[in-house]
Amino acid sequence: MPILLTGSLAASMHLTMPTEATAAPHSPTPRSSTPAPAPLAQVAAPAAVQAPPAQYTVASGDTVSTIAARYGLATASLLALNGLSWSSLIFPGQVLNLTGATATPAATPAPSPQSPAPQSPSSQSSYTVVAGDTVSGIAADHGVSVAAIYAANGLGAASIIYPGQSLALPAGAPAASGSVSPPAPAPAPTPQATNDVVTPLSAEMAVNASIIITTARSLGVGDEAIVVALAAAAQESSLRNVQFGDRDSLGLFQQRSSQGWGTPEQLLDPVRATTAFFGGKANPNPGLTRGLLDIPNWTSMTVTDAAQAVQKSAHPGEYAKWETSARSWLGQLR
């Protein structure tokens, strides 16, 4: 069982056990023909739990099981609600949804037999994102509002989704149209790339592309390496410094703490993340990660092969579609 959960598994189940009865001291008086009553088992008072809020922001030292225990929730239910598995990692600053997770029933020493209560259908289901999906499209297909999907998954208008990501879908959530409150702003469209077509830079993308270019210049990195970095960041994060990703991936290049790329705070520093992508003499993770300049003969590789040598993506062919855009962006921002 993963370390993440086992530290407080017992706490998450809220088990209470009878304490041992203290034996009465031996008395020299004659035995009575009537047997003495057996001492009553004492039941430990259950630990107080807090009423769960709709969402919870992960703090340092938290695990899924300790959060579940704190609010009287079932660990498995909390995992399912947030699209996590038993091996998933959580990190400080991550937002977890608590509303909809089922409570953990308290155990008693001698429960009275009774028929089980009928199970109510789950108030949520899940959806696995595929290529080309958008939050608005998923919401329309399932008859829920965009705002409801945002709330159920801790997302915002600037968030991006990626293939393979699991989204919680609140059942029966009302559509945004006709609501008294104004509808949530439409999410920024995820940039799409096509071979030989330049994808326009949004303001946010331009800022991050400029950081990559400026950092590269400060390191003495040439244009071809910059093109590789821009294509890699465009594919991994759409040139956005995102605070979430697959497992513990974060930032422009979706680097992972568990793979030695740095702490979550360091991964969200675009200058440091860019420096780590290039590696070489300035590599901030010497001996732990290998940047572009550490790849033998990278200059003889295609852009997509060079990017893949650093990123080790599950979709290695996707970098190629950003090459035309990356070369154009470099010309615009140099």
Image (tube, rainbow, N blue to C red):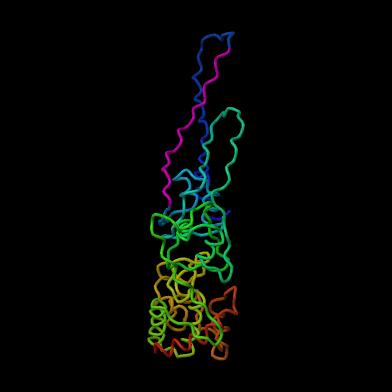
Q: Is 264 placed left or right of 314 in the picture?
A: left
On whether residue 178 falls in the magenta region, the answer is: no
Q: Position of residue 145 (x, y in %)?
A: 48, 58
Q: How many tags in the picture? A: 0
On whether residue 51 falls in the magenta region, the answer is: yes
* Farthest residue, direction front: 178
Q: Is residue 113 above or below residue 164?
A: above
Q: Position of residue 307 (x, y in %)?
A: 54, 81
Pick the residue in front: 3 or 185: 185
Pick the residue in front: 248 or 8: 248
Q: Position of residue 97 (x, y in %)?
A: 46, 53
Pick the residue in front: 158 or 5: 158
Q: Position of residue 44 (x, y in %)?
A: 47, 32
Residue ID at (53%, 32%): 108
Q: Which residues are magenta?
A: 35-54
Magenta region, main secondary structure: loop
- Look at the image and tell me in which quarter the C terminus lies: bottom left
Residue ID at (59%, 68%): 130
